[in-house]
Image (cartoon, grey):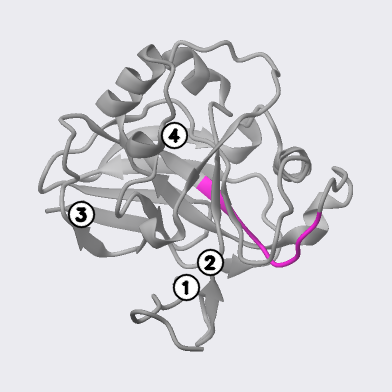
Amino acid sequence: MATVFAAPGPVTLPIAGSDLRFPVRRIFCVGRNYAEHSREMGGDPTREAPFFFTKPADAVVESGAVIPFPPKTADLHHEAELVVALGRGGIDVTVEEAPSLIWGHAAGNDLTRRDLQAEAKAARRPWDMAKGFDHSAVLGALVAGPLADAPITCTVDGRVTQSARTGDMIWSVPEIIAHLSGYVALCPGDLIFTGTPAGVGPLLRGQTCTVTVGDLPPATVTLA
């Protein structure tokens, strides 16, 4: 098929212990899915229905990268997250069916231009430019299979800034998948960032941020 210019190549992620790569289709993110983070952001941590935003697939940054400090922000924040990778799709799946869609997991960092997000919230506007900017989805290598409750941490230049357990989520991973599948047809290659615990905070030029989730490979990024 002829195109008017060269089509962009696929976005893929490394798989731990394999030469194969995981093709990324879409990135969905869950907002305020840990009670203490909901409180620190001024929200109510009751079990209201989960809400979602997205990042473009080409926002993916592999662990170990050095990225430019994003423009248009004076308040870049880290958000440590467990990321779920789907190997099967579905529409209106049940909570019981949801685990069968999961291919594997990764550690992730949902980089956020917090000042732009605050402005968008105040004006009741979308979060796209606060969340879906270039290099905003940092991910470690994927690991296939299920994942039990695990510690999740974030460090900035070796200092711990976030520390919780994935079991502290308000909405579990199967519940998230089931709910999201009522809005869109989920597909193989979709990634879901499942929310961040309390302790989100600023990143400055020259700092290195590392997210770990249990024994998954870390997601590390340095701001140039």
Residue placed under numbered mark 1 in the picture: 12
Sequence-wise first label, 3 or 2 = 2
Question: Would residue 51 appear left or right of 185 to someone viewing this image?
Answer: left
Residue placed under numbered mark 4 in the picture: 163
159 in the magenta segment: no
In percent of width and height, residue 174 lies at 76, 44
Q: Give the residue type at disc 1.
A: Thr
Name the residue at 28% across, 64% down: 64
Sequence-wise first label, 2 or 1 = 1
- Label 2: how many residues lie within 10 Å, few (<14), some (14-19) or many (20+)? many
Sequence-wise first label, 4 or 2 = 2
Distance from the alpha carbon under mark 3 to that under mark 1: 20 Å
Distance from the alpha carbon under mark 1 to that under mark 4: 28 Å
Front-lying residue, 70 or 36: 70
Location of residue 129 (image quadrant): top left
Location of residue 154 (image quadrant): top left
- Label 4: how many residues lie within 10 Å, few (<14), some (14-19) or many (20+)? some
Distance from the alpha carbon under mark 3 to that under mark 2: 23 Å
Q: Give the residue type at disc 4.
A: Ser
Sequence-wise first label, 3 or 1 = 1
Q: Secondary structure at mark 4?
A: strand
* Magenta highlight range: 82-90
Q: Give the residue type at disc 3.
A: Thr
Sequence-wise first label, 3 or 4 = 4
Dots 2, 1 in contact, CB < 8 A: yes
User: Comparing marks 3 and 4, which lies closer to the viewer?
Assistant: 3
Sequence-wise first label, 1 or 4 = 1
Give residue 24's mark. Answer: 2
Q: Secondary structure at mark 3?
A: strand
212 over 146 or under it: above or below? above
Residue placed under numbered mark 3 in the picture: 222
